[in-house]
Amino acid sequence: MISQADVERLAIEFWDYVKGGGHGDGIGHLFINPGVLVPSGELIDLESHQEIHRKLCDELHKWIDLEVTPVCDEPERVRVDGVVQWEASFADGRDGRIKAEVTEHWFIQRCDDGKLRWTHYASPVVRFLPDSAPLEL
């Protein structure tokens, strides 16, 4: 079964790529249905997601809470619910640091090749902390 450690490794692989600024197509292999559902309710493609993160630097992603619930065995799939501490500075040198807690709701599946992929990636809530810089991109 897909474990919490498996989920954490997949998340780190994704977040490391996000921080690196590569093109969205470069991370598409981690998704069955590429895209991220953002707080506005819009499903954005991976390149649009990358465009947001390219304007940031020194990003930090750290699990505050994480729950992995098995959904089915065939295909092997889990639901992931959690909260991630997210911080970032502005790449243009602007003062301030973004500090937020991001709610994550994901479905992850083990595919025939043994690799994990998102079937659904949603970050429906970004709660900015009181000392956060505004996210003005």
Image (spheres, helix red, strand yellow):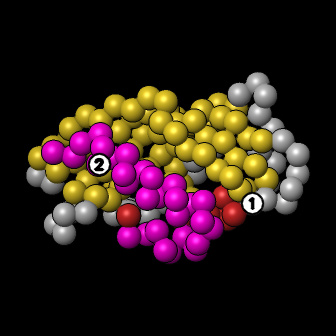
Residue 61 percent across, percent down from the top left: 55, 44
Outermost residue toward the front in this view: 58
What SS does tag 2 mark?
helix
**Residue at x-position 37% and y-position 46%:** 8
**Residue at x-position 43% and y-position 58%:** 13
How far is mark 1 from mark 2, CA to CA? Answer: 29 Å
Question: Can the viewer see residue 45 in this picture?
Answer: no
Q: Is residue 99 magenta?
A: no
Residue 55's disc is 1
10 Å crowding of disc 2: few (<14), some (14-19), many (20+)? few
| 1 vs 2, front mark | 2
**Residue at x-position 20% and y-position 40%:** 71
* Amino acid type at mark 1: Lys
Q: Is residue 131 left or right of residue 13?
A: right
Residue 96 vs residue 45, the one in the foreground: 96
Question: Can the viewer see residue 61 in this picture?
Answer: yes
State the extent of the magenta-drawn residues as a range. 1-29
**Residue at x-position 44% and y-position 64%:** 34
Residue 6's disc is 2
Q: Is residue 102 left or right of residue 134?
A: left
> Overall secondary structure of the magenta stretch?
helix
Residue 20's disc is none
* Amino acid type at mark 2: Asp
Quarter of the image for residue 5 reads top left
Residue 79 percent across, percent down from the top left: 30, 40
